[in-house]
Every structure is written in structure tokens, then in C-alpha cells.
Amino acid sequence: MTKHRSTLYVTSLVAGAFFMENLDGTIIATALPQMALSFHVGAVNLNIGMTAYLLTLAVFIPISGWVADRFGSRSVFSAAILTFTLASLFCGLSHTLTQFTLMRILQGIGGAMMVPVGRLIVLRNTPKDQLAQAIAYISWPGLTALVLGPAIGGFITTYWSWHWIFFLNLPLGIAALILTQLWIENVRTEEIHSFDWITFALGGAASSGAVYAMEKLGGEGVHWQNPVSILVLSLLSGAAAIVCARRRPATSFIDLESMKLKSYSLSIYGASLFRISVSVLPFLLPLMFQISFGLSAFRSGLYLLALFAGDLSMKSIVIQLLRRYGFRKLLIVNGLITTASMALCAALSPSTPPALIVAILFSHGACRSLEFTCMTTLAYSEISPSRMSRANGFLSAIMQLSMGMGVAVGAITLRMVAHAHGHSAAAPQLRDFRIAILVIALLSLGPVFDALGLSHDAGATTSGHRQPEMEVNPV
């Protein structure tokens, strides 16, 4: 087997694992009413299963790099797939809400190791000049799952039962486990530093507290005092974690050394705002289509397939675009186009021709996919192999945290706009959706402003882009 084919196989395997994990996080939403009947509880109570999963990811993702270095990437990736698959089985077999929540926590532990360790395996197996293609290949399944999850969940729940949402992971997990043993080497580092318990505790409290508080603030009929208090405490805990990291930079899970690189810090700061904003649209648009346009859940879901098609369209040309324009120009120009395409969604109305809606959503899907690939690839373009594990673990935690907060930020924004218009967010109007989408679109400008500080040749080794040499006039 050639190295090219070996790299392709490994990347495909990790992309499949990403799709399985991300699909599981979104597919459950449409099954909540049926699950509530099975557990004899209110549908709102089922949110604890989704929240518990997100909180577990937020806590355990930062340590994924240390665990992979300590026990080997193949061993950890295999254990993560096995844990995730078994937890999926037990989720489907749950008879009570307590059992289901405990299994979702177990599933979260598997997902927390599976996604970042899988990405680390790809990064270690891919040369710098092929990194953009590999990142594009493993990024679009996650974006696809955000769109396909609700539609697949609705289909399974309608024609079978909610249990099959989790049983669907069994054949996927078994196949991934077998291929992991065949294709992936058990790489581990020679030098293992001690486990950073202080940063782990403080960072875990900060990230889980932020996710919990935002989830509560996004709910209707919730008093804001307690969630805001928890959010403030989580910010203080995060500040304390950074202070501890500065005192022990060599062992901290917070990779301050990599943060000195503009190419990496952009994916922490500006890119986080972008991830939040694009995660909101698949949440707000179906609501707007159903509540304000009067469309069925099935038809509104079909519109979102245009986002999926746009995501796929960019995978084949991302290398050519990077080679011609470079990271800096693409992040700025494409970022502006992405924001504009998102703002166009606020102009949609019940009388908008379906073909135009599809065209706008397709364009937005293509642009956001390109921006995602550029930001993620640039983040690793200047990271040395010795720091790859720590840089990947920290960035994976930030990525999960920002993506996980997207729906909550969208709900909070819609709620605030509705209250500003003098009515409850339980019955939002079309203008509420429009203003909320415009506000969220502004967040997507984060990487645009951040990219202004990039050098013109940033990530040139990875993109293959070269600045044209200045002509020198003979004297």
C-alpha cells in the first residue's frame, strides 16, 4: 500500500468517525417528544440528555492530546470508538431518563476522545503541503451532520422508533473499530509530562459552566439570575486557569506557546465567533420556515439540504483557491461574502421563489465550508510536530465549545429581539427572525478582522501560495 493511499484511507476513516459523532449530536433533537413519552417525563426534561453530552465533551476534550501521547493514538481512538458505540447501544436500551442521561455522559467521554484524537492522527499522517485537502475532507462531515441530523432523526422517529437513532451507530462503530486496527499505527511520544490537574479542573469548570449557563439562558421562562451567576463564575474559573497556565506553560493543557502564532490564535479568537454564528443558522432557519412561512417540517428540512450541497461543492476546489490567493486574502474576501450570504437569509419572505432560497443557502454553504477549511488548516500550518498534540487538544476544546454554544446563542438572540418588540419568544414573528439573523451575521466577521493582522505569506508552505516578486528596474 502506498503512503498516498494509506493517508487517504486514514483520513476517510477519521472523517467517518467525525460524521458519526456529529450526527449523534444533532439527530436526537427531533426525537425528544417520542422519547419523553417512553420515559414518562416532559419533553423539556429531555434537554438534560443533550446538555450532559455537551458538558462531558467540554470537560474531557482538553486532555485528549495528553491521553493519546501517553497510551498511543490507535489505542485511544479504538477505545473511544468502542465506548461511543457501546454507549449508543445502552442509550437505545434505556428505560428511564436517569439511565439515558448516564449513557449520554458515557457517550460524551467517547466522543471527547474520538474527534480530537482522530484529527491528531490525520495531522501526524499528512504532509504540510497536503494538509488543506485533508482538513477539508474531515471538516465537511461535521457540517453535513448539522444539516442532515434533524431530517434523518425525523424520518427514523416517524417510521420506526427513537431507539434506532442510537442503534444506527452500531454498524458504523464496529466497522470503524475494525478499520482502526488495520490502518492506524499506535503512535505515542517519547516524552510524557505530568498530568496538569489544576488546569484540567479549572478549565473543565469554566467550559462546562459556560455551556450550562448559555443553555439555560436560551430557554424560555428561565430566570436569568442563576445562569448569569454561573456564567460569571465560569469566566473567573477560566481566568484562573490561564493564570496557572502562565506559571507552568510546559505542562499546561492551555497551549500558550502556540497562541503566540497569529496563524493559530486566529482559530481561537475570530474563528470562535464564526463557528458560533454559522451554527445558529441551521437552528433559526427551520423555525422561521415553519413558524413564519407556514412550511412543513419536511419541506423546511429539504431547504437545508442546499447548505449540505454547498458544503460539498467546495471540497474539490479548496486547494486551487488556496494556491492562487493564499490564506489571508481568502479569509478576508470569502469571510465578507459569507457574512453577506448570511445576511441575505434575513431578506427571505414567504413570497421568495424557492429557487432563490435554494441558491442563497447553497452559496452560504459553499462559503462557510471554505472559511472553515481555511481557518482550521491555517491553525496547524506552522505548528511543529512536537507541539501538535497539545495544540490540537486545546483547539479541539475551543472548537467544540464554540460550536456547542451556537444554538444557545441563537435562542438567546431571538429571545432578546422578541422581548424588545414586546412579545414572548414562544411566538416569534418574521421580523424577530430577520433581526436575529442580522445580529448573528455580524459575529461571522470575526476571522475577517483577525485576518487583517496576518502576513501575506502566512501558511504559504501549506497553501502553496507565493507572492509575486517585485520587478526591479535596472539602473
Image (tube, rainbow, N blue to C red):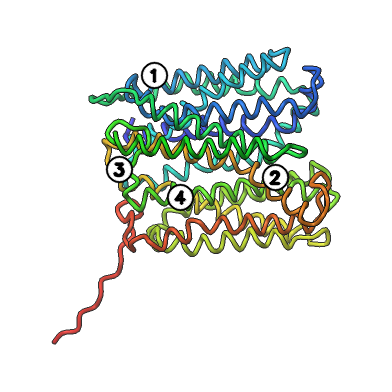
Q: Which mark is residue 243?
A: none
Q: Earlier in the sequence, mark 3 or mark 4?
A: 3
Contact between labelled residues 2 and 4, with CB atoms less than 8 Å apart: no
Q: CA distance from mark 4 to mark 1?
A: 32 Å
Q: Earlier in the sequence, mark 4 or mark 2?
A: 4
The residue type indicated by label 3 comes to Glu
Q: Residue furthest right?
A: 294
Vertical placement of 187 versus 445: above or below? above
Residue 192 x, y percent position in the rendering: 27, 24
Vertical placement of 133 versus 56: above or below? below
Q: Is residue 30 left or right of residue 111?
A: right
Q: Which mark is residue 75?
A: 1
The residue type indicated by label 2 comes to Ala
- Give the quarter of the image for residue 443: bottom right
Q: Identify the residue under disc 3.
A: 257
- Is disc 3 surrounded by few (<14), some (14 to 19) or many (20+) residues within 10 Å? few
Observer-side mark, 2 or 1, equals 2
Q: Identify the residue under disc 4.
A: 269
- Is disc 1 surrounded by few (<14), some (14 to 19) or many (20+) residues within 10 Å? some
Contact between labelled residues 1 and 4, with CB atoms less than 8 Å apart: no
Element on which disc 1 rests? helix
Element on which disc 2 rests? helix
Q: Earlier in the sequence, mark 2 or mark 3?
A: 3
Q: Identify the residue under disc 2.
A: 411
Q: CA distance from mark 3 to mark 1?
A: 28 Å
Q: Nearer the viewer, residue 196 or 327?
A: 196
Q: Earlier in the sequence, mark 4 or mark 1?
A: 1
Element on which disc 3 rests? helix
Residue 75 x, y percent position in the rendering: 39, 19
